[in-house]
Amino acid sequence: MLISKMAAEGGGKEMNEIKTQFTTREGVYKLLTHSEYSRPNRVPFNSQGSNPVKVSFVNVNDQSGNGDRICFNVGRELYFYIYKGVRKAADLSKPIDKRIYKGTQPTCHDFNHLTATAESVSLLVGFSAGQVQLIDPIKKETSKLFNEERLIDKSRVTCVKWVPGSESLFLVSHASGSMYLYNVEHTCGTTAPHYQLLKQGENYSVHTCKSKSTRNPLLKWTVGEGALNEFAFSPDGKFLACVSQDGFLRVFNFDAVELHGTMKSYFGGLLCVCWSPDGKYIVAGGEDDLVTVWSFLDCRVIARGHGHKSWVSVVAFDHYTTSVEESDPMEFSGSDEDFQDQMIHFGRDRANSTQSRLSKRNSTDSRPVSVTYRFGSVGQDTQLCLWDLTEDILFPHLPLSRTRTHTNVMNATSPPAGATIITNTPSNATNGNNSGANTPGMNSLSTTLPRSNSLPHSAGTTTTANNTNKAGSGGGIGGIGSGIMDSAIATGVSKFATLSLHDRKERHHEKDHKRNHSMGHISSKSSDKLNLLTKTKTDPAKTLGTLLCPRMEDVPLLEPLICKKIAHERLTVLIFLEDCLVTACQEGFICTWARPGKVGLLSSQNQASSPSGTVV
């Protein structure tokens, strides 16, 4: 399906137009239609009832200089390609590896970046029926299958990640609300695991696997109510942020197995989470249509962002645009070409030094600094939003008795061009319990909050909102072609006989999650003793207006720098790379957006010869 040239150039008035470029203060981001990845036939995938399309990247340090590899799942299929990005057009006729699964679908995957070479990569794949597979798509080998007989957990795998800095440990979360720590060197055993309590706290518990010999899982985490939708390790690997269907963000000290802090969504479940490059801030998104910024140090919500019209499915920080400046913000003058040249050079410098300068910012150096964090979000409303988190939000001007060393680093300047920051401050606000949200100096930025922003849109009114994927009930994983299992794995684990008490509990919670998607539902029917130990009812009405969940008027409200419709189906992927950003939608199209000045020669020529773009 083609779109008009006017739409390809960003013109037109129709709400349903697909944008192929957008402009920020850095310049123009352009969709590279010839760098689109999908199934080889390029036919839109009928996504009804299927799991979200996900994308993983790894660099194998190929001597040719083209070491980037991409993995993505579409329905029952899993693909592994050389990723050419902004440099060359995608060649979909030559996947390095392709696997088709029967009885279950891939739901998520993650590469081990430590062990990746040009000859071998370790890729973990989670499945809708609960299994986790370790494969090498370069050698086309399947080394191991974990939870093969679903004795550990029968619910859908929601997230799988290698533990940072480890070649053998990985963490898996499930729709049951449990997480499991595995070691690739250990087996899962032929019977259901028995657990011993290691630690418990408010709405969470951690158990070790009780057995004579070491076996998987090493640890079982039971977290919150309903599905554990996603987790993310902090940049230093020491902390773990988890978001759940009960609407809570929970941040744990991973090694100490201790709860660091919590946050509650404005409404509904939280679906996605990410860390800032320096680990100071966490952004979460979900069924309240908002992005919420949480301070790791202060353990409180410092801002919310409203731009999406449906559930937010992915949030991600842009490490290459996040900037730390030790002088006044850069001023530009001259022609548009001069502006582009300066911004390209500026962006390159920032990308090379952001991490070190973020570290320097937190040192004892008294030199004034200014920081702007860039992050993005995509949602079921098919829109991409980009956001800037600036110093006036991070460190609002406080009374003299509570001043910070960085309070005045912005020198009372306005936000960057293109950014709109709304602080919705009631005119009669005299309550001192607003956690510093209503502070002197912010009133100059205050405007009346638009009526449409006063309450989040009801998720139930959006036709694409309910994308809850039912956990597969099929048996083991059977590959076709290059995805055939090693016979040793297929025959090495005996069939299970009966479900344990824990299994029944997990199945019960899975059914509860299928029926209920609102913040108000919390299951209390389970008779499992473990469940009674770790889970207590949380009344949503009692959290609103507290530090867990401030009212809308109590924290600054961000508006997106850009908010563009870029797909026909709900968006499921947003990844920031050095030269581009990558998005994907449920139709199975993975799109590359070149950063300003980063359009490759071949892609530029191809796009110049084509009067219209291909709809993503």
Image: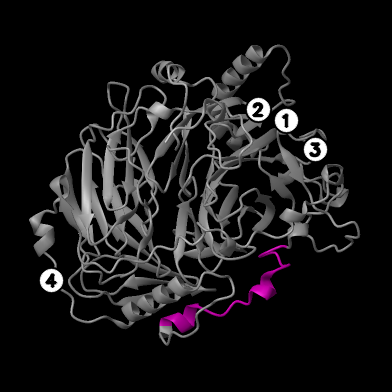
State the SS at label 2: loop
Q: Are marks 2 and 3 in contact (CB under 8 Å)?
A: no
Measured in 3D between alpha carbons, the distance from the residue under mark 3 to the one under mark 4, in whole angstroms, is 66 Å
For the C terminus, give its image quadrant: top left
**Which of the two discs, 3 and 4, sits closer to the camera?**
4
State the SS at label 1: loop
Marked residue nearer the N-terminal end (3 or 4): 3
State the SS at label 3: loop
Measured in 3D between alpha carbons, the distance from the residue under mark 1 to the one under mark 2, in whole angstroms, is 7 Å
Vertical comparison of 493 with 418: above or below: below
Q: Which mark is residue 417?
A: 1
Disc 4 crowd rating (10 Å Cα; few below 14, some 14-19, many 20+) is few
- Residue 550 position, x and y percent, is 71, 62
Disc 3 crowd rating (10 Å Cα; few below 14, some 14-19, many 20+) is some
Tell me which amino acid carries mark 4. Answer: Ser
Give the magenta part as a residue range. Answer: 530-550
Vertical comparison of 508 with 462: above or below: below
Q: Which mark is residue 408?
A: 3
Q: Are marks 1 and 2 in contact (CB under 8 Å)?
A: yes
For the N terminus, give its image quadrant: top left
State the SS at label 4: loop
Disc 2 crowd rating (10 Å Cα; few below 14, some 14-19, many 20+) is some
- Residue 124 position, x and y percent, is 29, 50
Tell me which amino acid carries mark 3. Answer: Asn
Residue under label 4: 494
